[in-house]
Image: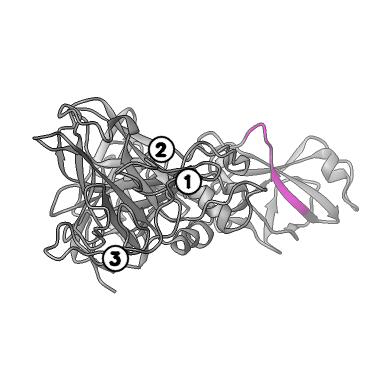
Amino acid sequence: MAVYKLFPSQDASIYSAYPAMNTGLDAILDVSNFVTESNPVAQVARSIVQFDQSEIENVIDSIAIVTGSEFNSWSGSFKLFVAKATNVILNSEVYVYPSSGSWNNGSGQYLDKKQGTNGVSWKYMDFSGSREWVTAGWGPLLTGSYSGSDNAGGGNWYTGSGGYDNVNDANIERSQSYSLRSTKDLNVDVTDILKVWYSSSKNINAGKIEIANNGFMVKWDKEYEFITSSAISPQLSFYSVDTNTIYPPQLEIKWRDFTYSTSSGDFKLDRTLTGSYPSVTSSISCSFTASLPDPASNTGVGSGAVFKGEFTSPNTMSRVFIDGTNVGSGYKAGDVLTFTAAQLNGISGLSDADGDATVTLSTFDIQQLDVIDTPDLFVALDDNPGIFYSESINKFRLNCRKEFPKRTFVTSSLETKQHALPSSSYYAIKDLDTNEFVVDFDREFTQISCDSTSSFFTVYMNGLEPERYYNILIQTEINGNTVIMDENYYFKVVNG
């Protein structure tokens, strides 16, 4: 899939009520403003989640390959899955910022009998008595909280836009709104933050402030922190990377890998094309290899495309190209190469040509798939051994045919020809135990591709929990009908 999932290298919650307590191995990440019943006191919790920068860069540089001119063609989402939500009754917002300053995960848990202090906490970045969070004198774009108060500390983070021109004036302050009945899972677009981290790491910031990847700071809006009113005490608990569930924090990097062409073929070197123009007494052979145009630039139904050629020497085409005023989305056997009289007369040894000459392509040169045109269809998932290692990458191909072909009296097998799904086709992946989508239908990032062999899509298994079973669903739109297919496309992911 063009959705690659990463999991945290470290995460922890920090609590104003326990300034030196570390919770690096706790199964829960808290984001809350808890108000005690008697003598009301507000106790604030925030969480920090960090993903490995080298893994992020590997996806961008080597897997998605969205560098250079493609640098703005990808997206990143930060996800936390709720374990418990309490008192989220007012319209409010949770903010996600890039954290500042390196910190240590530690091995403590919330309210251990012997409090763990060997990692990040409300007051300290490393361990109790070590480096403290900055509480005054912050640099540009940097902030923290409550210098000089009993609540000093709580992390440092960057805010504002930062003026990062090379990443579209990045907005590094992200948020999600909550209300009484809103979804409580956190799903925030952090594309700009990832781009700033990447630009800083690669030294391509064009003189902008360097912001290293020290993770995400997750906190309630400042207007809802340290409020002693019991009416304003929102509390969210999310699963951490140390959970024993299938809901650890995730960083999704998504990019569009969609290509669609029902045809393929090259004008092969020395391929002989049969000429039908009377004055051409010998065959015209290609001395130039020219692939068909990128299908993304084509429109139409794939018929009637006009091919033209240029000549440089007797009986030799130096270039074959498509008439831009009449271009189809596919090129099939039987399409016609058209040469003008002027082109023919320009060849040494040829003269007195009038009108046009035509050359017909052979079936060996061009392969063409018919696009399925009925909602009554059968789709089988090919290239599915049923078991995949967690780090594997698999290209699934789809065998597609009409379920009820037109009645025809023939002496051979009927409808054995492969068909292509329409370009408006998408896939999703569902966890069979929880019946939840781990990859949902997405018109941008899960669109099914096609080449001259079949429709296909690629899945990166790293984001799927090992030792679990999954099912693939196919959705396509045909003649105004939306068809969703669930044809037992099952597979299992195992450790490896």
Q: Is residue 446 left or right of residue 260?
A: left
Residue lying at the far left of the rendered structure:
38
Q: Position of residue 265 (x, y in %)?
A: 58, 55
Q: How many marks?
A: 3
Q: Quadrant of residue 84?
A: top left
Q: Is residue 339 left or right of residue 9?
A: right
Q: Mark 3 Cα within 10 Å, few/some/many (few <14, many 20+)? A: many
In the image, the segment drawn in magenta is 318-326
Query: Which tag, 2 or 3, sits closer to the chain's start?
Result: 3
Q: Mark 2 Cα within 10 Å, few/some/many (few <14, many 20+)? A: many
Mark 1: amino acid: Ile
Q: Position of residue 299 (x, y in %)?
A: 55, 34
Q: Which numbered mark, 2 or 3, is in the foreground of this view? A: 3
| Residue 415 in sight from this viewpoint | no
Q: Which numbered mark, 3 or 1, is in the foreground of this view? A: 3
Question: Is 409 placed above or below 325 here?
Answer: below
